Image (cartoon, rainbow, N blue to C red):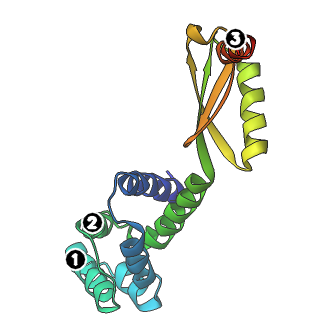
Amino acid sequence: MSNRSVARRYARALFELEQEGATIREPLNAVAAVVGVDAAREMLAEPRIAPADKARAIIKAAEAAGGKLTPEIERLVGLLCERGKAELLPEIAELVEEMAREAASEVEARVVTAVKLDAATTKKIEAALEKALGGKVRLDVDVDPSILGGLVIRVGDRQMDYSLRTRLQSLKRAIVA
């Protein structure tokens, strides 16, 4: 497995931890900055230094530089030193930042239809929403026969109701009034 693949696996796990509420990026960037220094890379390459000592040195240097490390990042540094992969920390930090940027531009939209949509129609709706919202859209499609036809789109706190049920209710109100 290539180093990029290994770094991506660690980055994905860290990003998921951050999505769950853990503080990851700032302390990760602190240890990545330490590992990016030539003297630290030389120390990591030295086989006579025990992995636990390498991890302690990285953690102390990051904290001395003003970085407040979390237990998750300290465990990560220890694990990577133990496995001889601590030089991947800058790449892991870069990948986590990239994942955060991608996630920030992705919007989740919920579409409710009266019948199950085929893949082509789902793609068309997704493309139209991406164009309207100006970013990547992750579509969640539900079926609710009570809307009779059309669709209801929910994006965040906005709702666009193009259902037949709503149109019929509006027509009924217009006739009665």
What SS does tag 1 mark?
Answer: loop
What SS does tag 3 mark?
Answer: helix
Tell me which amino acid carries mark 3.
Val
Q: Quadrant of residue 145?
A: top right
Compared across the picture, whether 3 is left or right of 137 comes to left
Q: Is residue 142 positioned above or below 57 on the image?
A: above
Q: Is residue 164 visible?
A: no
Residue corresponding to mark 2? 82
Q: Is residue 47 visible?
A: yes
Q: Could you say where residue 138 lies in the image, as x and y percent from the top left?
A: 61, 38
Residue corresponding to mark 3? 176
Q: Is residue 104 positioned above or below 133 on the image?
A: below
What SS does tag 2 mark?
Answer: helix
Tell me which amino acid carries mark 2.
Glu
Q: Residue at x 30, y 68 (%)?
A: 73
**Residue mark closest to the camera, 3 vs 2:** 3
| Mark 2 to mark 1 CA distance (whole Å) | 9 Å
Q: Quadrant of residue 48?
A: bottom left
Q: Residue at x 65, y 13 (%)?
A: 165
Q: Could you say where residue 106 lies in the image, as x and y percent from the top left?
A: 61, 48
Q: Categorize mark 2 by other alpha carbons within 10 Å: few (<14), some (14-19), many (20+).
A: some
Q: Residue at x 26, y 76 (%)?
A: 55
Mark closest to the chain's N terminus, 1 or 3: 1
